[in-house]
Amino acid sequence: MGAGRPPVRRTTRLVALACIIAAASAMAAEALRWSHGTRQVERPAVATVAAPKSITLSEVSRAIIPMPRGVPSAHASALAALPGGKLVSFWWAGSRESGPDVKVYASRWVNGAWSDNWVVASRESLGQALGYGIRRIGNPVAWTAPDGTLHLYVVATGLGGWAAARIVQLLSHDDGASFTVRRVLPMSPLFNTSTLVRTAPVALADGGWWLPVYFEIGNKYPMLMAFDAGGEPRRIARIGSGTSSLQPAIVPVSATEVRAWMRDAGEGQRVQQAISRDGGASWEDLAPTQLANQSTSLAALRLSSGSFLMLYNHVAAGGSDRNVLSLALSTDARTWRPLADIVSGKPGDEFSYPTMHQVGDKLHITYTHQRRSIAHHLLRITPGKDRL
């Protein structure tokens, strides 16, 4: 420090930081107001189902997706559809979370097996395309547009931690073999930072999609960004008014009712939820579900049978581990019944950040396995008695 200059007190720094965080949250909320204006709001694509039918899930196979050699950590998988019933999985892997060597990898599901992995994004490739340095990269999320273009969204930071993250949109026209950077999404007025992705996009009736996103600096809350069929962003909306939930999993129930279930960043350890009664134009918070969930990401989808599935880290009262990944079922998106544990282990094990995708009569599940790899379970869906 310079001579004669008093040291800056820690309390003063904390007060200044608190003011910045409060201002950032206010600015972000202000930026979202336009989404409730007179613009026409898109509608989710919903298949007509007379009534949910009972199902039986039976395991066909389980495997570990081929991991990059010599890379000890892997996390946050995502799935996207490809033509002909094929899938592509994305995840990040490196020496550790936030490590400088972390890259986003991919593998294809073809003819009942996963291909060898390949790199689709790194700090260097994103930095070169954007024209400035990238400090760390993280969660990927993917969506296949009606024209076959594969859209990949990757969390990336310049300075700071995940609270300073931005979302980079990449495009592929060869089923994920290669990607080009399209843009950094315009999400927040605070240097366009503190927005992240984690959960699967949602199809819209006009060929576009919703990308679930969340804001994380100070107050934490879920949002969605709407894209048209060409992958152009057209609006952003906040989901509810709470300030302690994130990583929304969004599922349409009808053309007007849409549900969102979220990770709880507070003390309740319950799956948080919100509802839209006007097709996603506005949202209101609901009381937490009865499902206990350690603060971690969850997955939800509606099956073609009409039933709803949720995959989450169930914990007993007072628990804190991610060592049990449980499947719950609902016929009305309101009440949930535990179905079975997909995987469980001893305290200290980790099976987390799941994602699900239905292809015909098959249900694909991927999740983080012990923070070292990505596991895949293939289940067959048949008429039955709601059991696994």
Image (cartoon, grey):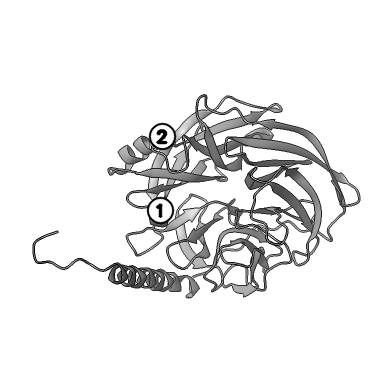
Task: Decide: is 184 above or below 107.
Answer: below
The reply to whether residue 178 is visible in this rendering is no
Q: CA distance from mark 1 to mark 2?
A: 17 Å
Amino acid type at circle 2 is Asp
- Dot 2 lies on which element? loop
Look at 76% across and 58% down and name the residue there: 48
Labels 1 and 2 touching (C-beta < 8 A) = no
- Dot 1 lies on which element? strand
Quadrant into which the N terminus falls: bottom left
Closer to the eye: label 1 or 2: 2
- In terms of depth relative to the viewer, which is nearer, 321 or 89? 321
Look at 44% across and 70% down and name the residue there: 32
- In terms of depth relative to the viewer, which is nearer, 264 or 143? 264
Look at 48% across and 49% down and name the residue there: 230
In the picture provided, is 284 more to the left or to the right than 105? right
Amino acid type at circle 1 is Ala
Q: Tell which residue pokes out farthest to the left in this image.
A: 3
- x and y percent of residue 199 in the render? 58, 52
In the picture provided, is 207 more to the left or to the right than 7? right
- Residue 101's label in the rendered image is 2
- x and y percent of residue 121 in the render? 43, 36
**Residue occupied by mark 1:** 165
Task: Decide: is 261 above or below 355.
Answer: below
